Image (spheres, coloured by chain):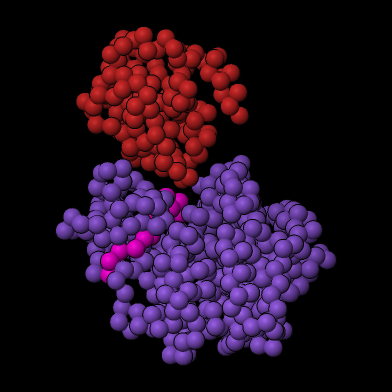
Chain colours: A purple, B red
């Protein structure tokens, strides 16, 4: 167990990280991610209110659809990254555990008084991830299997009310299931009893998201990193790029047009030595060109993988670099941000 | 696996003549979890008791392996380069790390035998 954002969290269960990781890609795992913040925004026009704080296109989000975006600050840095669901008459936000208090203060300070902000303190969040997730959930709710990626549905599982989104943090197909905490244990035990479902901890969650090229807040993105530098420009629509109206919009727009000095990239070490967070990245000229922000062993990839920031001149794929691991230069190269293909449900 | 002596840092030593084979204990490998990389010293390196000797990386993190005895590294287990999981499968056998030509045999006197190490580990968990 480790302390994580004020929660006691298991790094792994009895099977260990490697086995939990592999099981998730082969079948399905349950992750207790109840530490994440769940926030409801209500008001006359919560989408317009939220768009004043994020570069994502919230206004065009259809009911029952979900989108990834970031809270930005005045210099375009990322205060937090989040997912926003249009739940019909309100917006449902899932934010990072370590940032939820700061996010709520930020929302209260910035949003108009007629936008009601409710933190769902007593809601649990259970992620069911992996190729068996859809067959398992479909046994309870046939519609679950047809849900598009990044969509949301409300239903009941054996009488337990749940809000389910088809999303996750592993690169696999899967769901995140929100339910009042009082139901969480029963729901988890129910799903865990299904064939092919096991528990997985924080360690596997980290190696799965790293292989999938997904950012971890506070490591790969922070208040000094813009969405453009973080290779998240895909999450900013044409309308939002042109219209702005969010903190740091001018800086972000200029970065999209003119480019950035540094970029988030995938990094592939050539030896078996993992290049972990903080590893200095050295270019062909012998100078430091960047730093690893997340790195470790990729069990599905079958070797060490990393992501980090390098100066844009060195961000081209296959650029040869050296990774300084415990004072020794270890060769590697710049790679795509994803080390395994996403297997999200595409219908 | 008789004749093993253990350190408080969970390394073991097996002495044959003046050559000490060094590895990490069953308890240590369980704590580390799946080992994915082992960084071994160069042969010829002189190590000091309790000084850095190797690094073992699990999926979780990198951990130092300390030299339980002082001396010169005369051999390292190159099998670990391609098969680091040997450390998990056979920590006190094929998963050994290095061999040291010891300079001070009395350093082994303060190390624990199997029984005292078992008690020591029981006290840690």
- Residue A147 visible somewhere in the drawing: no
Does the stretch in magenta take in A165? Answer: no
Is A81 or A167 nearer to us in this picture? A81
The image shows residue A318, relative to residue A63, as above or below, that is: above
Residue A202 horizontal/vertical position (percent):
56, 52
The image shows residue A135, relative to residue B119, as above or below, that is: below
The span shown in magenta is A297-312
- Residue B106 visible somewhere in the drawing: yes
Q: How many marks?
A: 0
Residue A164 horizontal/vertical position (percent):
68, 70
Q: Is residue A237 left or right of residue A92?
A: left
User: In terms of image quadrants, where is residue A313?
Assistant: bottom left
Location of the C terminus of chain B (image quadrant): top right
Which SS type dominates the magenta stretch?
Answer: strand
Residue occupying the point 33% across, 57% down:
A291
Residue occupying the point 41% across, 67% down:
A224
């Amino acid at each position: 167990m480790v302390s994580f954002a004020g929660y006691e969290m298991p790094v792994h269960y009895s099977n260990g990280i490697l086995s939990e990781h592999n099981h998730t890609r082969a079948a399905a795992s349950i992750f207790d991610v109840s530490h994440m913040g769940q926030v409801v925004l209500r008001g006359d026009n919560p989408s317009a209110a939220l768009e004043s704080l994020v570069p994502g296109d919230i206004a065009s989000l259809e009911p029952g659809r979900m989108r990834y975006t970031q809270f930005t600050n005045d210099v375009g840095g990322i205060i937090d990254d989040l997912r926003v669901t249009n739940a019909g008459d309100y917006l449902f936000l899932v934010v990072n555990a370590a940032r939820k208090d700061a996010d709520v203060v930020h929302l209260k300070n910035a949003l108009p008084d007629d936008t009601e902000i409710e933190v769902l303190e007593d809601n649990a969040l259970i992620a069911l991830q992996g190729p068996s997730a859809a067959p398992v959930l479909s046994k309870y709710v046939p519609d679950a299997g047809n849900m598009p990626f990044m969509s949301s549905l409300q239903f009941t599982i054996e009488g337990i009310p749940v809000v389910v989104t088809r999303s996750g943090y592993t690169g696999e197909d899967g769901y995140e299931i929100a339910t009042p905490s009082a139901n969480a244990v029963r729901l988890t035990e129910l799903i865990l009893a299904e064939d092919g479902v096991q528990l997985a901890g924080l360690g596997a969650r980290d190696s799965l998201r790293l292989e999938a090229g997904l950012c971890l807040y506070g490591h790969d993105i922070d208040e000094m990193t813009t969405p453009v530098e973080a290779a998240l420009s895909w999450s900013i629509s044409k309308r939002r790029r042109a219209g702005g109206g969010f903190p740091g919009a001018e800086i972000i727009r200029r970065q999209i047009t003119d480019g950035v000095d540094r970029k988030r990239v995938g990094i592939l070490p050539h030896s078996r030595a993992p290049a972990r967070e903080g590893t200095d990245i050295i270019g062909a000229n012998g100078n430091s060109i960047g730093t690893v922000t997340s790195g470790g062993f990729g069990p599905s990839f079958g070797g060490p993988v990393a992501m980090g920031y390098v100066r844009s001149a060195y961000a081209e794929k296959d650029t040869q670099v050296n990774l300084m691991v415990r004072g020794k230069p270890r060769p590697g190269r710049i790679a795509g941000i994803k080390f395994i293909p996403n297997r999200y449900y595409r219908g | 696996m008789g004749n093993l002596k253990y350190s408080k840092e969970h390394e073991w030593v097996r002495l044959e003549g003046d050559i000490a084979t060094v590895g990490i204990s069953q308890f240590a490998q369980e704590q580390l979890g799946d080992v994915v990389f082992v960084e071994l010293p160069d042969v010829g390196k002189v190590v000091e008791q309790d000084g850095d000797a190797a690094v073992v990386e699990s999926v979780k993190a990198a951990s130092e392996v300390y030299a339980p005895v002082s001396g010169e590294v005369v051999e390292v287990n190159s099998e670990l380069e391609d098969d680091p999981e040997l450390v998990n499968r056979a920590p006190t056998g094929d998963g050994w790390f290095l061999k040291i030509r010891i300079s001070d045999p009395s350093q082994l006197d303060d190390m624990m035998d199997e029984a005292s190490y078992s008690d020591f580990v029981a006290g840690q968990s």
